[in-house]
Amino acid sequence: MDILSDAVAAMRLGIPHSNRTVKIAPWRTYFPAEGNSAGFHVVLQGSCWLVPDGGAPVHLQAGDVAFMPRSRGHAITDSLDTATETGTETVLLCGAYYLDGSREHPALAELPDVIHLPARVGHHSPLRTAIELLGHEVESRHGSGAIAPLLEVLLLFMLRAWHQTHPTDTGWVAALGDPVIHAGLQAIHAEPAAPWTVQTLAARAGVSRSVFAQRFTATLGTGPLTYLTWWRMTCAARLLRESDLLLRVVAEKAGYTSEYAFAKAFKREFGISPGQFRTHAGPEAA
């Protein structure tokens, strides 16, 4: 079970999209903030500048990736100066993902507004491979059915690349690298409906109850059972949104033997009943 990909799948809504563009200097394109979305720009050829609203400009060169995990207005331009070399060509691969803003996973919430992943030989090989494949599919237009899955893979590899190059002592970067916490998270994500306790999660991680609870809370800033409940409700919301399963079945998959207890917990988390949530966000409303 890949915890990061599992978290991303639970947060993402709808179908991601991308396009390949060729820009001839001088040029400038502005992208306004657009709801609960995340976007990326990959420089396939040439170079450009990314200028986030209220932020410092970022210089992007061939092979560089810029990822914005939350919607933020920004421009991309060939130059920061008025004087530019006319005719210079830049090729870009740009795309966007739609995310559930009400359930932003901590793994995404702790990311900076702009992530810059420079192209470096021997670094982030899976990410580079995904970019090449996606660029080929978008350019050829022969494999439109493969574009959405490749975009999902690209998102995961961008997040992995960032986490791998920015180690910390706390937060999700640290949790994913801690074998004890990782084992507990794996158990929760693999079987959210299981009757987990701090003791059984600690046993899965191979440490004492007190060690597991202290280490989990100190690293992630929340207790194991609090996260368990949050993840169960996140999974339940996804089932309500994407399926027509009976509420009783959704409750069981979320770890509740009582539909009433599930509905009460769900309303406490979301402010509305499971039925109301499905009406507003489920497949019938899409």
Image (cartoon, rainbow, N blue to C red):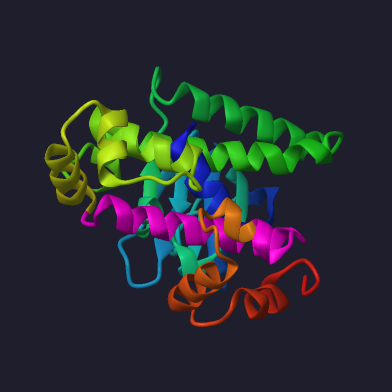
The image position of residue 198, as x and y in percent, is 26, 45
Instruction: Report whether 154 appears left or right of 269.
Output: right
Instruction: Report whether 156 appears left or right of 279.
Output: left
State the predominant SS element of the stretch in magenta.
Answer: helix
- For the point 57% across and 60% down, the residue is 236
Give 178 or 16, whichever is nearer the viewer: 178
- Name above or below for residue 154 compared with residue 123: below
The image position of residue 251, as x and y in percent, is 59, 60
Quarter-of-image position of residue 226: bottom left
Give 57 or 217, whichever is nearer the viewer: 217
Check residue 235 for magenta coloring: yes
Quarter-of-image position of residue 247: bottom right
Q: Which residues are magenta?
A: 221-249
Which residue sits furthest right? 142
Give 55 or 270, whichever is nearer the viewer: 270
Instruction: Report whether 148 appears left or right of 96.
Output: right
Give 78 or 167, whichever is nearer the viewer: 167
Q: Quadrant of the C terminus?
A: bottom right
Can see residue 282? yes
- For the point 34% across and 55% down, the residue is 227
- Name above or below for residue 116 compared with residue 135: below
- For the point 53% across and 67% down, the residue is 262
The image position of residue 9, as x and y in percent, is 57, 48
